[in-house]
Amino acid sequence: MANIKLKAHLREASQPARILAVQAFSRAAGAPLVHGNSIRLLKDAKENYPAWLEAIRSAEKNVHFENYIIRDDNIGKQFADALIAKAKEGSRVRVLYDWMGALTETSGSYWRRLSDGGVEVRCFNPPSFNSPLGWVSRLHRKSLSVDNRVAFVSGLCVGQMWAGYPERDIPPWRDTGIAVRGPVVADVVQSFSRAWAEVGPEIPADELPDQKSIPIEGTVDMRVLGHVAATAGLYRLEQLIAVLAQKTLWLTDAYFVGTTSYVQALRGAAMDGVDVRLLVPGSSGDLKFLRPISRAGYRPLLEAGVRVFEWNGSMLHAKTAVADGRWARVGSSNLNLASWLGNWELDVAVENLGFAHEMEQMYLQDLDNATEIVLSEKNRVHPVEEPEPPPKSHRAGMGSGKSGSAGRLTAGAIRVGNTVGAAITNRLVLGAAEAKIMLSGGAALLVLAVLALVQPLLIVVPFALIAGWFGISLLLQAYLLHKSRKNGNVSDVPPSRNKDNVVEIPGLRRESAAEPPPREPSDARDGP
């Protein structure tokens, strides 16, 4: 009897803490917890692509598809055929792709074929003269929703490299996605609608669902993290998870470049006894010169007890996390500032014991094909056992994956910038692993200095052109804003963000709020 009373007392005492945890998660992510959903874990293209195509072919009303890269290859043609066929049957089919993602991957004839087939196609954020740096913010999301009844969120783009090249003995890229049903589908659709409205007219309101219009499909609680860019909702949530994790925190990331504060959060968890693991792509593939750059960021993690693993397959492109066997995340966001603060991303945070267990089992399976990185007795970062180099055909396949190479190159450039900046400002303790980066950075700066002395026009002319471009664009934007305000067409919110700064419970990060969100129920569970 005493034990029963004690357990009841502990449950009662923990209720306020759980409510506070739910509130903290909602505020940090800018995303309310949505109840009553079902979820299905999808591994690699062999499970994701067939599910996507089946959903498209079953559509009766609408298809909303957004993706960073849709390649003009055999896989891309399969999706084009399915989308066109559905549009010709009378369904409203909308496709949103990213300008930069399609720049070298997709021909103009591909988009014309879709348009001629009845598909509404829009390109996200192409360069414009009056916004010199606007192109930096990309549509990096990968989502599909059909008939407001099922939605898919993942890290997969559309291309043959995700399916592999069996005839050349090149394995598929490793990636993860989910299929969801229930009220949370409304949030995914609303997220798509906001990005769609950035490029042209909005989707009619009567086509957009709210959570109440979609029936309950299960018992899974989740949040859709998909607001406008530069809100840092996922960044705050990831740090909160790292702080609250008590037993495990297992991360998979394609282009990890953690900020100082996030690295400290991971270090703090590991030093407090949490089993923190990070699985990243191997550095022995198409860009060998990135090996020291990639591993330079491992040292502070390894020293604190974080376990780091490098994938031995063709390319690890998944972006996932699982903590304490009860909280998990799947989506498009990498653990770097480009995803956290720049791009339009879409992720789903799931609070469910069963799904988290699935994620843990999948993670352990992935580690079977990974090499652990450790610190040697000489305090050097190196693999436990160097994996066998992939065959030539395998390396060729990796090289053909331009998006993977470019992504790793970008991540490497960010890490170089962080390291050089740290050395100049003396704000971080740098180790031997950063020496090569500092050497490269110092040499590059010295070359620029010599060029400026010997051939100053090589430095001055590009700078003058860029400064002139920026100046003209600012003047043009100021004129347009003044003209619009004079005509009474400008509100206090920037035109491209009207109605989007208030979060509504049904749609989370892409919903305009018609009424304040209801409070979370008192029996809601806490996070990890």
Image: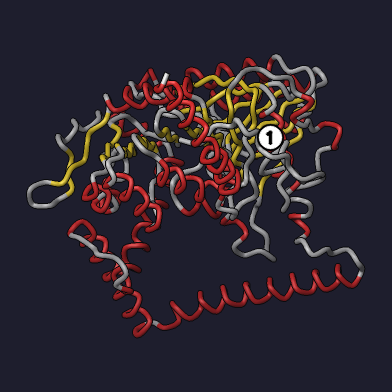
Q: In this view, does 386 lie to the left or right of 35?
A: left
User: Which quadrant is the C terminus positioned in?
Assistant: top left
Say left or right for 398 vs 120.
left
In the shown orientation, is residue 241 left or right of residue 151?
A: left
Q: Nearer the viewer, residue 82 or 326?
A: 326
Which residue lies most toward the front here? 1
Residue 272 shows in the view: yes
Q: Quadrant of residue 136?
A: bottom right
Amino acid type of the residue that numbered disc 1 sits on in the rendered structure: Asp
Q: Position of residue 516 (x, y in %)?
A: 76, 45
The residue singled out by tag 1 in the image is: 187
Q: Residue furthest right?
A: 487
User: Residue 284, position in %: x, y?
Assistant: 25, 39
Give x and y (percent) for residue 448.
Answer: 35, 75
- In this picture, is 141 found above or below 220? below
The residue that appears at 18% across and 48% down in the rendered structure is 381
Q: Which of 340 and 101 is in front in this view?
A: 340
Front-lying residue, 137 or 327: 327
